[in-house]
Amino acid sequence: MDKYTIIIDGKEIEAKAGQTIMEAAIQAGIYIPHLCFHEDLIPGGHCRVCTVMVNGRPQSACTHPTAEGMVIENDTEELLEERRRIIEMLFVEGNHFCPFCEKQGNCELQALAYRFGMLAPTLPYLNRKIEVDASHPDVFIDRNRCVLCGRCVRASRDVDGKSVFGFEGRGPNKRITVNAKDERLSETQLSAADKAASICPTGSIVVKRVGYAIPYGKRKYDHEPIGSEIEKSASKK
Amino acid sequence: MAQDQGSTIKQIVKDFGNDRHRLMDIALNVQTQFGYISDNAMETIAQALGIPFVEVRDMVSFYTFLDRKEEGKNVIRLCDAVVERMHGMDLVAQAFEKELGIPFGQTTKDGSISLKYTACLGMSDQPPSALINGLPLTRICPEDVPGIVKDIKGGKKYTREKLQGAIPSSQVETNLRKPGEVIFAPMERGAAIREAINRPPEAVIDQITQSGLRGRGGAGFPTGMKWSFCRKAKGKEHYLICNADEGEPGTFKDRVILTDAPDLLFEGMTVAGYAIGAKEGYLYLRGEYAYLLGFLEQVLEQRRHVGLLGRNIAGKQGFDYDIRIQLGAGAYVCGEESSLIESLEGKRGAPRDRPPFPVTYGYLEQPTSVNNVETLCCAARVLEKGPDWFRKIGTKDSTGTKVLSVSGDCARPGVYEVALGITIDELLDMTGADHPQAVQIGGPSGTCVAAKDFGRKICFEDIATGGSVIIIGKQRNLLDIVKSFTEFFNDESCGWCAPCRAGTTLILQMLDKILEGRGSTLDLAELQKVGNTIKKMSRCGLGQTAANPILTTLQNFRGLYEALCKTDEFMPPFEYEKAIAAGVEIAGREPVEEEE
């Protein structure tokens, strides 16, 4: 396979033909903040948090293929501000109440907010009325916490082979729907063991009865900021 | 669902070859047959196509013209675009509501008529306009409304079946005010094709490259380069798509080209097909122009009849090519080329991340060239008259003419074909505009130009545009127009990416705060920042331009905003009295004010 060099924030790293910027960066131990991206899934390009400047133009790192000699800016004040604003937008678009959400400490949205230094949203809340579906015996959807990252859609379709989830509507009315006429999760083939049941970055799709198995304070992002695992892999290299 | 409905739907799916990529046609046909697409209908479609139900719901729920609930037997879609609002659309709306006794968004009790609003119909030169069961009706006055309703109830006109005919007596005016030498000049059927097939395809592309022709959708990508990339890309098939999904509010030039010069367009599509090595070309026709479908089909049939489509075109052995028209269903974003391709494949019209670009990875993952209606017309003319002839028109970097759709406050709204490089002032003179306060060039996604800049030129070097020109007179409240544009983007956002989906909702709310006089200069700064985030971080052209109405007026008309902001201090995003009203009612007592 063709190998070449690309530059991220002044640092030369190796990339392979066909690799996206995100893949090359992770391999080199460089953290590009991301939310809808997941290593086991086809990238979706929904959240735009991973936007980097590629030869001076904004591109999403998760979808943009590398090319020889590419010059990429990632860790800049300007991008930090834009990324923080997107995270803020997601906080006010949904209804996110971290203190009593069972996902807190393991939530990627919350962890990104902390990493970006967001204390509280400065944008106006949209205060939308959003429904919850607890019909399934083992999994529930709380769309209040959904950021429409589409991970569940991709995981169910591409990994589980079930297409339990899909999108419905457009623009501000876009929402996650399920593969059942009456829209009840219990009427779908979803099982708690499915990839789609546990891949949600927030507390929107949650497996029941395991939410508090690990207490607050001892969870993934309680110990260190999101992205640390990628950055640590660099220091080992 | 009744058994016969199920079998009818299965038959429709079968008529489209049980092909998942024809889901748009299947959905449109089911809707025509039954008036809407029920959950049961979607389930039958999914089963017949062998795809998950959720995929059908995903697709159907995306398009404005596809209904999932039972609507009235007749549907009135009144256009609420900016120019229509400028010309009394609200009075027409009131007249309909009064006549039918229902507000917009509802259906009469007897199930006969539904009232809906819709985005720009491409009739801004003859506002206010509406689609009645898909047929356009223009220049509607409030006084006309009782007669229209009587007609509809009498069942004499405006029935769904009428859609299938030739151009109906739809009363749509052409309003071609200034024909130019490229698009609206007389043409001889087959002349450009004969010039093309006498050359190898590469030489045809060379002619286009030499002409300097650039894409007329607004972005201005060199057409020769696009064709060359597409031809060279490896694939099982190559496809040519003509983008006739002009949805930019204030644009209607394609309507006039499709009505007056369809032969030139099909000539261009055939030349392009030959150049890139395609066997199939698609005309993606916006759902709002469904009334043109029958007429365009007839023109295609005539061209097949004279050997300009089909096998061995114009006698050229092995040059086999045909054109299919794909109808859209009301989604502005499908004018973006990758969304259009998704829609053509029978999916929701969500844009793709690029690269890969359509020229290498387009329709059905094959190399595809997507070109604007006007671009393809220009290409035909370049072959017919030569690149040198074409280069003599326009400027050095913007060769040829541009067809402009002019609407708003002027004496002669309509279509003008002018040489590129024309100044806004010259255009205003031509159209009989009287010292407007602003001109919106390129529609909402373009630029709001102030009077001091009317010396600027319309061309790729200065103000590039797809052709929408909305003239805004001194009597108009410009910020109301900005709000209407912003609402449009919010409605039309596909919702795929966060900055566009959440961002357009937020700037609308922030703009409202300012317009209601509750804003401070801090809010202007914040609005600017959120607008910039949407522009920079969004996934496609829609999002990247969705904040333009606000951003360009903040730049060019800042005084209008500042006049509404009475303080530099923080202003809360809510009104205190209103916010506590519910609590006051529950508690049954007023809050006690603290004493100083």
Image: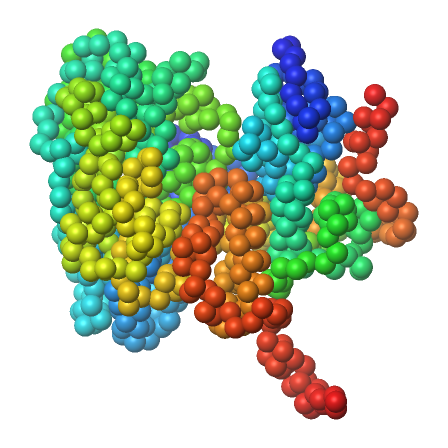
Nearer to me, B397 or B60: B397
User: Residue A62: x and y, percent?
Assistant: 63, 32
- Residue A83 visible here: no
Task: Give above or below for B160 relative to B18.
Answer: below
Image quarter for residue A63? top right
Position of B284 with respect to B506 (left or right) is left
Nearer to me, B146 or B11: B146
Position of A27 with respect to B265 (left or right) is right
Give me the residue at 60% from left, 22% from top. A70
Image quarter for residue B180? top left
- Residue B82 visible here: yes
Nearer to me, B453 or B459: B453
Task: Give above or below for B395 relative to B457.
Answer: above
Quadrant holding the C terminus of chain B: bottom right
Give me the residue at 19% from left, 39% from top. B418
Task: Give above or below for B210 relative to B119.
Answer: above
Colour treatment of the image: rainbow
How many numbered marks appear? Answer: 0
Give me the residue at 13% from left, 47% from top. B177
User: Residue B29: x and y, percent?
Assistant: 34, 44
User: Residue B415: x and y, percent?
Assistant: 19, 46
User: Residue B513: x and y, percent?
Assistant: 52, 68
Image quarter for residue A198? top right
Task: Give above or below for A210 relative to B526.
Answer: above
Give me the residue at 65% from left, 86% from top. B585
